[in-house]
Amino acid sequence: MSEMKLIMERWDGFLLSENLEQLKDNPAETADLIEKIPTITDRDELQNLLNTLTRDPEIADLIKSLGEIENEQGLQEGELSDKILKTYVQGDIAVQNFLDTPTGQKVKKYGLPVLALALGALKLHQGGALDPEEVEVLAKMALNKISTTDLGGAVVDAMGTGA
């Protein structure tokens, strides 16, 4: 029985990796995948999903950029959300400044569905689970239902304050 489970997990991973480009271009499917993540209880399946997402160049690039922001600011893993929150509450000018940074330019280039997948993968990589509020925010992000001015707050909500 466990052999069959392993085969199915590998098949699911293969299908996801083969269809990831299409998934990123389809906000509804991206949101569906994000909403499915909290229902995955098998650690191997979660790890396979994380591995598949981080093999994608665009998702990996955003994860790396978000990690670099943490390093530049001398933040521990998960503290980035606090920094983004501080920036967000400073108003629209600070959010626009973020969008003018190299990471912000990548967000503009790759789009919000890719950012949603990257934030979900980053949260999983840091050992966190996605709570219902984070899933809701990431799903809205994937569906492009987050305005530019709300982006900073959405990133904070998606990453949680104690990620």
Image: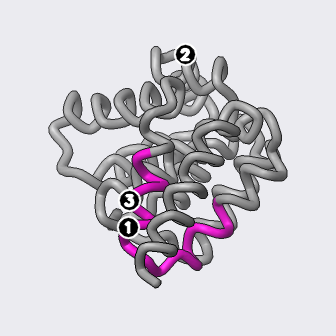
How far is disc 2 from disc 3 in space, using C-alphas? 33 Å
Q: Amino acid at mark 2?
A: Asp
Residue 139, position in %: x, y? Answer: 71, 58
Q: Is 106 left, or right, of 71 in this rendering? A: right
Give yes or no for contact between labels 2 and 1 (Cβ–Cβ under 8 Å).
no
Residue closer to the observer: 15 or 152: 15
Residue closer to the observer: 65 or 73: 65
The secondary structure that most of the magenta stretch takes on is helix
The residue indicated by pointer 1 is 44
Identify the image quadrant of the C terminus: bottom left
Badge 3 crowding class, 10 Å Cα cut-off, few under 14, some 14 to 19, many 20 or more, is: some
Name the residue at 51% across, 54% down. 120
The residue indicated by pointer 2 is 100
How far is disc 2 from disc 1 in space, using C-alphas? 38 Å
**Please, what secondary structure does the residue beneath circle 3 have?**
helix
Q: Mark 2, mark 3: which one is toward the viewer?
A: 3
Residue 97, position in %: x, y? Answer: 53, 22
Q: Amino acid at mark 3?
A: Gln
Give yes or no for contact between labels 3 and 1 (Cβ–Cβ under 8 Å).
yes
Please, is residue 97 above or below residue 20 in the view? above
Residue 70 shows in the view: yes
Q: Is 129 left, or right, of 17 in this rendering? A: left
**Residue span colored magenta:** 34-51
Please, is residue 130 above or below residue 156 in the view? below
How far is disc 3 from disc 1 in space, using C-alphas? 5 Å
Name the residue at 64% across, 37% down. 18
The residue indicated by pointer 3 is 47
